[in-house]
Image: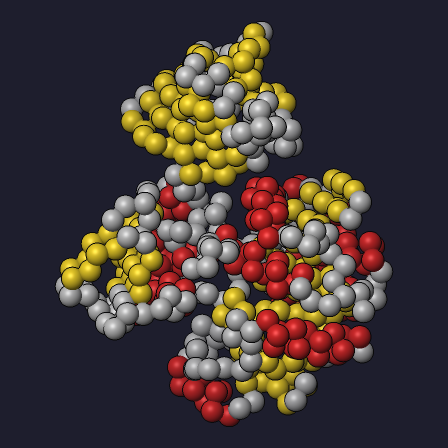
Amino acid sequence: MSLIPVILCGGAGSRLWPVSRELHPKPFIRMPDGQSLLQKAFLRASALQGVQEVLTVANRELFFKTEDEFKEVNRASRNTSFILEPFGRNTAAAVASAALHVAQMHGEHTLMLVLAADHLIADQEGFATAVQQATSLAEQGKLVTFGIKPTAAETGYGYIEADAHDVLRFVEKPDRKTAEAYVSSGRYFWNSGMFCFSAGVMLKEMQEHSPAILNAVKACLSVSRHAQAQGYSQIELDSATFDAVPDDSIDYAVMEKSRNIAVVACDIGWSDIGSWSALSDLTAADELGNRIEGEVLLHDVKNTFIRGGDRVVGAVGVENLIIIDTPDALLVADRARAQDVKHIYAALKAQGHDAHQLHQTVHRPWGTYTVLEEGKRYKIKRIEVRPGQTLSLQMHHHRSEHWIVVSGMAKVVNGTEEKLVATNESTYIPAGHTHRVSNPGVLDLVMIEVQSGEYLGEDDIVRFQDNYGRC
């Protein structure tokens, strides 16, 4: 059996704000054991039998972050490939591009296992057994979905009504009374959003039930940039043609319309970690029901989850709260209203506030930068450049920059001049000067950048050359 796990790494995770942001979404959140949800998905997939490579569909802006996550845990050097989307177009487009790619590279009979990057599965052995059952059904030409045996009358999940492996129907998220009836009947399972099928069968079903999506993705792939190396491929989808792909989920586009669906019912400790309440359950509670991460001091506090950051958090005389502290944003919520955190995220996005999109520390292909302080006409950043990496050759119209090297060695282009700037040395970049910095050493380069000028927005940048395709 040849199996290609496909990890769908999308979505904002708005209910897990302020840790989840648009450019640091839910899959990158670290669990109490230090691994991210994305890393756990990769390890879960790559441990299965028959896996040739792991294919990930992700936003183009998150590619280097995703690649770094995999490098941390890919000890077996599993082949990895990527399809990079310029923006989200829901799961049908992602599955279509993955199926077309797998069919072309590995053949239409190759089996695909579609997984979400932000789910948690506690029972790896049970998961592997469920996948074996699913691949057996997929080899018979079925589109297979995974149904989770419900442990409670959840209203936040869709359900599948089934008779053995036969799917009778998919149903939308129910109200409380309906959910209780579903659970008590024993015929209904949570819809996990995980699937298994051969590439050719999915393409045939898409051609029948959602040809507009399939044809639009085909057109996009035909003009997209492909890079191929030994055991590795990367497709960067063309933004103009991808914009024409209809926005729909694979559930609506295919699964709920097809007459060729099978289900594998499983009890594998699955959770989609859809809220802070769900995430807090991963941390052990004290005798008063409190769950704590970070440096936290409590006095007369009950049934409260507190996730601290880089500073001390104190709580007095409260109960049934969720408190999440990050360097630039603080969330305080009633534990029973955890699902409503998404409204704060939506309001920030509507306002164009940076807190919906970025953390103070921002990851870039070459390293990171952290905004230390910002005021009228000035901004101070800590910049860290990894060994051998180079920022783009660029220019700013409205700001000048002072660079002070804290550790390492910087190679600086400033107009027509090129020089090395050592630790405890500095240089000045006037507005309008073409410039770039690179790290020629083997240690991290750390600089303090002081910007000054009439406008300090990140969009005041003109790139002339970039190693990461951002021009």
Q: What quarter of the picture does the N terminus occupy? A: bottom right
Q: Is residue 97 left or right of residue 22?
A: right
Q: Is residue 192 above or below residue 30?
A: below
Foreground residue among 334 and 120 = 120
Residue 457 point in image, percent of width and height: 42, 28
Residue 63 point in image, percent of width and height: 60, 44
Q: Residue 263, located in which quarter of the rendered image?
A: bottom right
Residue 319 point in image, percent of width and height: 21, 67
Q: Is residue 423 visible?
A: yes
Q: Is residue 153 left or right of residue 52?
A: left
For this orientation, the residue located farthest to the top is: 416
Please give the name of the residue rendered at 74% of the width and 74% of the height, measured from the top-left corner.
Answer: 135
Please give the name of the residue rendered at 28% of the width and 46% of the height, measured from the top-left corner.
Answer: 311
Q: Residue 278, located in which quarter of the rendered image?
A: bottom left
Foreground residue among 264 and 248 = 264
Q: Is residue 17 above or below residue 51?
A: above
